[in-house]
Image (cartoon, grey):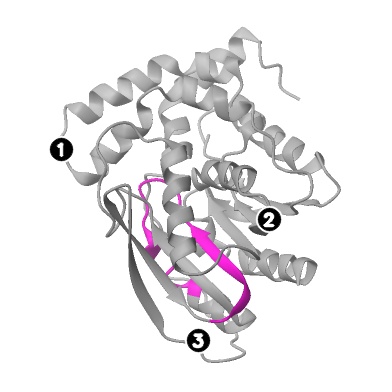
Amino acid sequence: MVNHTNPLCRNKIAVSGVILLVVSLAACSTSDAAPSAPTSAPASETTTHKVVNAEHEVVFHVTDGKLPALVLDAGGGLSSSYWKDLAPRLARATGSKVITYDRAGEGESDEVSGPWRVESAVSDLEAGLKELGVTDDVVLVSHSIAGEVATNFVTKNPGWVSGAILVDANVPDFFTDEMLTAFAPAVEEQKAALLAQPSTKKNRQLLSVMVDYAPVHRAYHRLAWPQDVPVTAIVASQTPFTDSPAAAQLWRDAQARFAQAAPNRRHVVAENASHEGIVTEQPDVVAGAVDEMLKTVR
């Protein structure tokens, strides 16, 4: 276990501050190709639904099927297209209803002015699932910052979620005061760099997440995943902190602590996978975790 208060550790973590933002924002590129997978049945046609919530439009894509419904939520800076290979594979293999969507400011969904707030993201997901008639027996599959959406969603909506797969996701355990203090200067540097660039939808979204970043994540650190909802934490073997072994170890430790906090949690390491590319680099690991979760909750 790395000592969180070790000054040397703090220095190394601070150097990785910008990379830590990438963990939370997942503003990254992914491989377009995914290995082919065996299929058990043709996937149903996918339909698009535009849901209005708090005066903005959120776009959902639905492949019909049985419950539990699989709700796939990509990391920040990424749209529903992140799941373009895995979503139809899961629909064919499981027969479940599969839902992907673009959070506000991502993909086809409307931008929302002001700082990004997880409560708003949760409200958008609630509104969409209500309109789609999916308010129970949901299995969340959440990548990166979508782990924060999942944690807040499952806490706020007891009874909706049967289980979850967190795909190299942000877990509350990671965002200690020491971590947030150590990379605070890097947050400001990243803000300045983005403000110096042309204003694009992507850059505006990244900047919105950086507003009040430390207090927002201190609040997240105080949350706890409900003990009665099973969850699998998939961790990429290549952590987001490629230049900081200390920060990488803190990330691994936090993921392990989260998984060990209840008997209905699993900890899975996706070998030869990166944070940003885990879904395309190791789709079998994610699909296998979904299959195991469905066996548990059905």
252 above or below 221?
below
First in residue order: circle 1 vs circle 3: 3
Mark 3 touching mark 2, by CB under 8 A? no
Taking the spot 48% from the left edge, 20% from the top edge, the residue there is: 215
Residue tagged 1? 199
In front of the other: 59 or 253: 59
Residue tagged 2? 159
Q: Give the range drawn in magenta.
A: 65-87
Q: Determine crowd level at label 2: few under 14, some 14-19, many 20+ residues with C-alpha closer than 10 A.
A: some
In front of the other: 257 or 5: 257
**Residue 86 visible to the viewer:** no
x%, y% of residue 180?
52, 19
Q: Disc count in the image?
A: 3
Q: What's the residue type where badge 2 is placed? A: Gly
x%, y% of residue 10?
57, 14
x%, y% of residue 288?
68, 69
